């Protein structure tokens, strides 16, 4: 009944922030002779009460929050009332999407051939006041991705940022997560820094994911990006190098854990994080002092280089250094 009256422009609705009770949905304005209906709150509560099998219906109900007659039927779509309606509608849709997590159906999906499949919600973008794919990405997808990131849903974060074509953000999120999990793992190893075979690298830590889980996601994403020319062209070299180095550190620690020490040393040497090839170790003493000076210069260069690396690597440098010493 309220929807029918609202569509006809015959419903007196709230024009300010909702102050009505959840039971009545009525707002009594100080200067009004009759109460107003909190139409937005009523619609949102009704839509969210629908079961998961009726999410399509819930979306349709939420789209009614932008009915033109709710703001007096103003023709100017940029007026304050219409803008406020769109904001309320966007917030309600984002919240529903986050709760139901059916992103492929509602937001679209990336097919195996790289083409994008439109989602259910994209059919109704004009009702949301959205006029382009870029605006849809900024208004809906990015907000969902940011919330997933802030609340620790790594898989959803990667999926949503990827869907929004924010590939460098995906790599940065993965690097940060790998760095944090490595740091936590290093902290639990004790002050010795030794990564012995008793360490369980698959135990869930951080975002509810184990180190192996995050490592697997990072490897799959990086490989996928490198295989797609249109993605590889826009990737930030620093993000790619950071992710590659962190994965190499993972390989190093895994080899050390298995007791494959030669393999571990080869892996960590390839990262060029540590000066493992000593110039002064060469046979002959004629230029020994010069060689040692060269070693000092080399170590200084490596130290300067480490300072320029991403925090996800530098914060784990003590773990890498001590594990390398233990491997030697």
Image (tube, grey):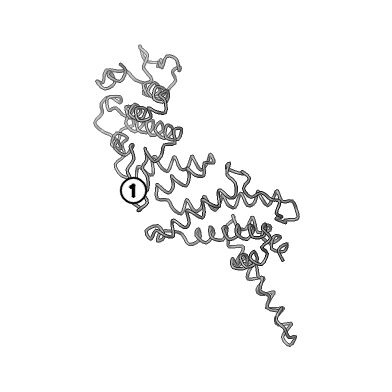
Q: Quadrant of the C terminus?
A: bottom right
Quarter of the rendering containing residue 258: bottom right
**Which one is nearer the viewer's eye here, 58 or 215?**
215
**Which one is nearer the viewer's eye here, 41 or 156?**
156
Instruction: Please indicate whether residue 243 sits to the left or right of residue 193 in the image.
Output: left
Q: Residue furthest top?
A: 33
What secondary structure is marked by label 1? strand
Residue 79 picture location, percent across and down: 30, 33
Residue 286 picture location, percent across and down: 73, 88
Q: Quadrant of the N terminus?
A: top left
Q: Residue furthest bottom?
A: 286
Instruction: Please indicate whether residue 169 sits to the left or right of residue 299 in the image.
Output: left
Residue 231 picture location, percent across and down: 40, 57
Residue on which the image places disc 1: 116
The residue at the point 72 percent across, 85 percent down is: 287
Instruction: Please indicate whether residue 176 sits to the left or right of residue 49 in the image.
Output: right
242 up-or-down from 184: above or below? below
275 up-or-down from 63: above or below? below
Instruction: Please indicate whether residue 253 sits to the left or right of residue 139 in the image.
Output: right
The residue at the point 42 percent across, 28 percent down is: 52
262 up-or-down from 74: above or below? below
Residue 157 picture location, percent across and down: 48, 44
Task: State the count of labels.
Answer: 1
Local crowd at mark 1 within 10 Å, few (<14), some, or many (≥20)?
Answer: few
């Amino acid at each position: 009944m309220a929807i029918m009256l609202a569509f006809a422009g015959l419903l007196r609705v709230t024009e300010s922030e909702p102050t009505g009770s959840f039971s009545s949905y009525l707002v009594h304005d100080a200067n009004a002779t009759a109460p107003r209906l909190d139409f937005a709150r009523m619609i949102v509560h009704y839509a969210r009460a629908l079961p998961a099998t009726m999410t399509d219906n819930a979306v349709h109900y939420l789209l009614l929050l932008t009915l033109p007659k709710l703001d007096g039927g103003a023709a100017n779509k940029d007026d304050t009332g219409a803008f406020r309606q769109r904001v309320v509608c966007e917030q309600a849709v984002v919240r529903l999407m986050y709760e139901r997590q059916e992103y492929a159906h509602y937001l679209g999906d990336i097919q195996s051939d790289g083409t994008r499949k439109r989602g259910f919600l994209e059919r109704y973008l004009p009702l949301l006041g959205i006029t382009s794919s870029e605006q849809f990405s900024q208004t809906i997808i990015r907000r969902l991705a940011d919330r997933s990131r802030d609340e620790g849903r790594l898989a959803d974060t990667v999926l949503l940022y990827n869907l929004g074509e924010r590939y460098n953000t995906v790599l940065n999120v993965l690097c940060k997560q790998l760095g944090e999990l490595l740091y936590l793992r290093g902290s639990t190893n004790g002050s010795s820094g030794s990564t012995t075979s008793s360490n369980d690298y698959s135990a869930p830590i951080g975002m509810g994911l184990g180190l192996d889980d995050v490592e697997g996601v990072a490897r799959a994403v990086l490989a996928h990006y490198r295989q797609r020319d249109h993605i590889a062209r826009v990737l930030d070299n620093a993000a790619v190098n950071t992710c590659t180095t962190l994965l190499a550190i993972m390989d190093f620690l895994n080899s050390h854990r298995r007791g494959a020490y030669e393999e571990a040393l080869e892996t960590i040497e390839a990262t060029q994080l540590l000066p493992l090839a000593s110039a002064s170790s060469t046979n002959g003493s004629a230029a020994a002092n010069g060689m040692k000076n060269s070693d000092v210069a080399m170590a200084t260069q490596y130290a300067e280089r480490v300072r320029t690396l991403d925090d996800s690597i530098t914060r784990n440098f003590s773990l890498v250094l001590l594990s390398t010493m233990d491997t030697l």
